[in-house]
Image (spheres, rainbow, N blue to C red):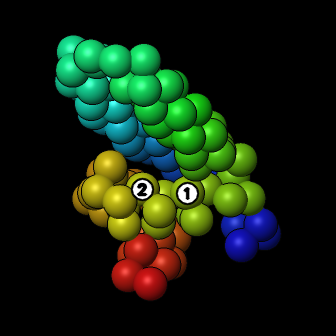
Amino acid sequence: MSDLVWSDAEKEVAQIAFNRAYEREIAALIQDVSTQAASIAALEDLWRLHDFLSARRHDVDGKYDYRYSVLVFVFSRLVKEGWLQLDELEGLEQSKVSKIAALARM
């Protein structure tokens, strides 16, 4: 899929959708971390939070890759995980949206 061509209009739609998904996931992560931090009562709880944050950072950093050659895969994962809705990709070529939808169902 690295041969897909992205028009300027599609790039704009993609950037907005990408940013929305990222903001949603980060907001949910912050809420989760706040809840976990509020319940820290022992050193083990602190280390557990540290481990959780390390794992989530690795996941988020790897997931949000804005290279056009992999963006269809990124969007399909974000749709599958619920951070993005297909209708937020309106403005992309229908063939791209169809690929994203098909991959999200896998």
- Local SS, label 1: helix
* Residue 98 visible in the displayed image: no
Q: Looking at the figure, which quarter contains the C terminus?
A: bottom left
Write the residue at 71% across / 73% down: 1
- Pointer 2 local density, CA inside 10 Å: few below 14, some 14–19, many at least 20: many
Q: Residue 7 at x, y = what percent?
A: 62, 51
- Local SS, label 2: helix
Q: Residue 65 at x, y = what percent?
A: 65, 45
- Amino acid carrying label 2: it is Leu
Write the residue at 56% across / 40% down: 55
Q: Residue 20 lies in what quarter of the image?
A: top left
Query: In this figure, which residue is indicated by the disc labeled 1?
Result: 74
Q: Check the image and report above or below for 30 versus 73.
A: above
Write the residue at 47% across / 62% down: 77
Q: Is residue 88 left or right of residue 57?
A: left
Badge number at residue 78 = 2
Q: Residue 35 lies in what quarter of the image?
A: top left
